[in-house]
Amino acid sequence: MSKTIVALEVTEESVRAAELSLGRKPQMVAYGEVPLPPEAARDSEVLDPGTVAVALRQLWTGARFRSKNAVLGVASRRILVREYTTQAMRPDLLREALPYQVQDLLPVPASQAVLDFLPLTQDGDQISGLLVAAVSENIELIISTLSKVKVRVQAVDLTAFGLARVTAPLVGAEETVATVHIGDHTTQLVVSRGGVPLFVRILPIDVATSAVRRHDEALTEASLELVGGNGGSVRSRGAIRATQPPGVADLAARLRSTLAFFASRPNAAAVSRVFVTGAGAAAEGVLSAIDAAIDAELRVISLGDVIPMTTPPPGGEVALNLVGTVGIALGEARK
């Protein structure tokens, strides 16, 4: 039996993973990130399985991961996360009933969705918690792509749940905090207490990280080659982004409104502080904009703040991105 577990994320810009030792006090023993070419993937969606498989093979070889067992972290604007209340029943019966109960809430037929329910509170015969729904085809395609490089998926976890898990040791057990992972195209916000997620929002916002800039440069070069070759006109995604505002003000405003929405709910506990991580935290103007927009204490966290390491730590955006990845692995490593 393997003594480590690898947590993996597929984003539009890269595939990244962290390997943790198993047990009560996990340590990170290896990590890696491999860039993806344009149009190979979106956040938690594989568009070109062959290209992504090549990157995954490079990732496992380059990082020298010991294990071929992985837990897959997913985070996408196409994943539904919402509060849901239903009749209390045995977990196995709830799993059977859930597809019929939530069909009207889903963007696809229940038969085409992967569903999960995290129970949080019970009032009489009613149980409330977080409903998570993802398109099964997208998840299955990632799993089949991993199988091409002989990686076995042991579990699928919402990255936001990993973020709640990884920041729990940084605060008191009864303290309510928000953790924000600012990715290249998707920002995740989770409010949690004692590592238990209470509220999740996934916000589709582009942020000018260095990975995004590299992608845009590659697309611009490709479009110029096409223009030179056929005399036509191609406007790349990079060229389009160059005419748009960087999204910093929008990001800060949406985080503020999301936290205000949580605070307005009945019996909502006050958020005492906000942890920020992800590559977008290093983008120009992001932290100052968020700090000006929210009232709670703001703290940026990197990999060294959340996990002991037996390997030299990464720096820069990699160390910020891997915070959520480690949180995904912790769910399996501590079992």
Image (cartoon, grey):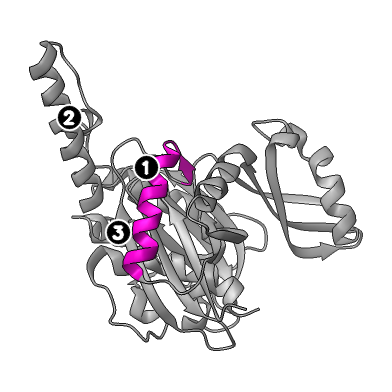
- Disc 1 marks which amino acid? Thr
- Disc 2 marks which amino acid? Ala
Q: Earlier along the polypeptide chain: callout 2 or callout 1?
A: 1
Compared with 298, 305 (above or below) is: below
The disc placed on residue 279 is 3
Label 3, residues with CA under 10 Å away: few <14, some 14-19, many ≥20: many
Q: Which residue is mark 1?
A: 51
Position of 253 with respect to 68 (left or right) is left
Q: Which residue is mark 2?
A: 222
For image coordinates 60% across by 44% down, the residue present is: 140
Position of 318 with respect to 323 (left or right) is left
Between circles 3 and 2, the one closer to the viewer is 2
Task: State whether residue 229 appears in this view.
Answer: yes
Q: Find out whether residue 223 is within the magenta segment.
A: no
For the record, the magenta segment spans: 44-63
Residue 289 versus residue 69: which sits nearer the camera?
69
Residue 330 versus residue 104: which sits nearer the camera?
330
For image coordinates 39% across by 56% down, the residue present is: 57
Between circles 3 and 1, the one closer to the viewer is 1
Task: State whether residue 195 appears in this view.
Answer: no
